[in-house]
């Protein structure tokens, strides 16, 4: 992605925050797949549990649930926020 793409923010919640080792990080990506998928995994090759956990997380792009949409088709607003929500008891 171009360096002219405004940086957004990835916010990790609960177990995702613990496995990522940070509550949030900036990201430059055009799609959710690039920003909250391959990018964070590639930066944390020493954290295999983090990569596995991401496969079970729900995502919000700019406050809207991503649901079953393909992550390559989801483009958060420029400078927007992606929330990474791990599964949790009760719903």
Image (cartoon, helix red, strand yellow):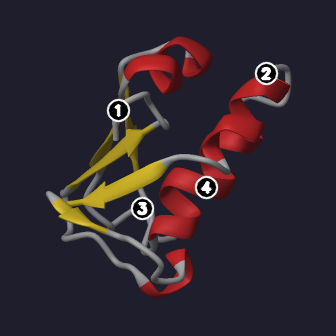
Name the residue tied to disc 2. 47
Looking at the picture, does residue 31 appear above or below residue 27? below
Side of 79 where 58 appears, left or right: right
Instruction: Residue under label 4, please give it.
Output: 37
Residue 88 image position (x, y, % from top left)? 44, 30
The Cα atoms of the two marked residues, 4 and 1, are separated by 25 Å
Mark nearer the N terminus (4 vs 1): 4
State left or right for residue 90 relative to residue 33. Answer: left
Which mark, residue 3?
Answer: 3
Q: Nearer the viewer, residue 35 or 18?
A: 18
Which residue corresponds to mark 1?
90
Characterize the local packing of mark 2: few (<14), some (14-19) or many (20 or more) Cα atoms within 10 angstroms: some
Residue 32 vertical placement versus 70 (above, below): above
Q: Of circles 4 and 1, which is in front?
A: 1
Tell me if label 1 and label 2 are in contact, CB under 8 Å. Answer: no
82 shown above or below 62: above
Secondary structure beneath disc 4?
Answer: helix
| Badge 4 vs badge 2, beta-carbon distance below 8 Å | no
């Amino acid at each position: 992605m171009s360096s002219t793409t405004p940086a957004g923010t990835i916010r990790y919640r609960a177990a995702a925050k613990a496995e990522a080792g940070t509550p949030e990080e900036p990201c430059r990506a055009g799609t959710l797949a690039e920003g909250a998928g391959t990018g964070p995994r590639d930066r944390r090759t020493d954290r295999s549990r983090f990569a596995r956990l991401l496969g079970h997380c729900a995502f919000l792009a700019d406050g809207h649930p991503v649901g079953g949409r393909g992550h390559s088709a989801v483009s958060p607003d420029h400078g927007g926020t992606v929330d990474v929500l791990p599964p949790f008891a009760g719903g």
